[in-house]
Image (tube, helix red, strand yellow):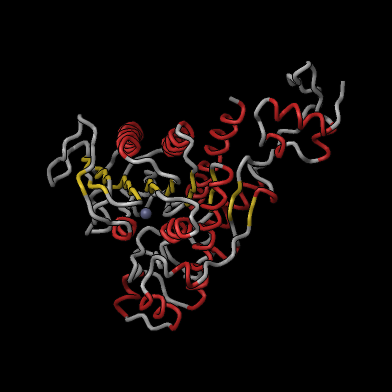
Amino acid sequence: MVRTPCDANTAIERHGVLRLREMVRSANDLTSLSMTGALGSMNFSKPAVSWKRPMLPFKLVYSNGYYLPIGAHVFPAEKYRLVHDHLLADGIAEESDFLEPQSATDQDILLVHTPEYVHKLKTGTLSPREEMELEIPYTPELVTAFWLAAGGAILAARQALTDRISINIGGGFHHAFPDHGEGFCMIHDVAVAIRRMQRDGKIRTAMTVDCDVHHGNGTAAIFAGTRTRSDLLPSVGPGTQSVGPTGKMSGSHAGDVFTISLHQHNNYPAVKPPSSIDVDLPDGVGDDDYLSWLDNALSSGLRQFAPDLLCYIAGADPYREDQLGGLSLTMEGLKKRDELVFRVARARDIPVMVTFAGGYARNVEDTVAIHCNTVMAAKEAFLRSLSS
Ligand SMILES: [Zn+2]
């Protein structure tokens, strides 16, 4: 029996697969959907629902304005558009999966950054030293792009609270401090989004999980509070100041935002202000060790802190072919990393907002593939959760 689209929706809701309705809402799909059984146990006739281009069970946030006008640079500013185009070309997403963000307001930016710094950015009065620390050439257009990235993070955070996950195809500028920018990062988009969600009363607490190869120094500095020693795993002591052959986990706990950073110890930044949990990894760590450390850090963090929102900074630069990284993760290992974060968050029903951060592979297509795999990992994790 072929039921009407309306009947199909009701049966799907009975099965608790509310979002599936959105995936099959196109008229063409619904007319080919057939169902049998009193409670609507579903069989799909042939041709069944077209799964070639299913809508995602969450939203991607993207704008062409994410492009950073920095000229020839090791930072592949075109990667955001390439990821967007690749997701469409491969049928991983379709246009309706994307939301276009608006720029953050100055008020939003001021939730994290100092009025003096914001004034310098808006009037083009950074000192030569400040511009050098930023490591990308200042222009007013660059300011516009960073305000937009922060707006994208705000939208992704808001959307994550509705859909349980949302991915910003940009952002992750974790080296920005309240009063200055560093390492290609002018504005800390993730911090702005967290503070905006808190100001709006949508969340009280958040956790950042930073898997970029570089330490999240800006994040640690912004969310540093009155600290007490973290409750680390019994097998991991407070450690010494040096990083052993297998790495070191250390930590002290901050206030309403818990920060986790997994990074290569012998890499930028030279000074690493303490996160709630820092995992200092030695050079050359591969997939298995990395995943063990991540698992330990997440377990430890979530044992002592219950976030209302998890902000996952999914850097592509732990990749073994990265020009600015010294770890040895494979593309498959990086996808497993993403899957682990999503699985852990989903098991605890914590909403996840994802941003991309660094990625400087010799071949830019590798960086694009790693970022696209993050979307694929989320799609698989959250489609599975809908059907379980
Ligand atoms: Zn990085």
Give 172 or 305, whichever is nearer the viewer.
305
Quadrant where ligand 1 appears: bottom left
Q: Is residue 314 visible?
A: no
Give 360 or 211, whichever is nearer the viewer.
211
- The image shows a total of numbered marks equal to 0
Image x and y of residue 348, in percent: 45, 33
Tell whether 61 sits left or right of 346: right
Task: Indicate whether 380 appears above or below 312.
Answer: above
Tell whether 252 sits left or right of 190: left
Q: Is residue 109 visible?
A: yes
Image x and y of residue 42, in percent: 74, 21
Indicate the quadrant where residue 129 lies: bottom left
In the displayed orientation, state which residue is furthest to the front. 201
Give 44 or 258, whichever is nearer the viewer.
258
Image x and y of residue 14, in percent: 70, 26
Image quadrant holding the N terminus, namely top right
> What residue lies at 60% left-to-right and 43% top-to-bottom?
58
Tell whether 30 sits left or right of 148: right
> What residue lies at 41% left-to-right and 35% top-to-bottom?
333
> What residue lies at 52% left-to-right and 41% top-to-bottom?
373
Image x and y of residue 263, in percent: 30, 47
Give 274 or 40, whichever is nearer the viewer.
40
Image quadrant holding the C terminus, namely top right
Task: Indicate whether 337 appears above or below 156.
Answer: above
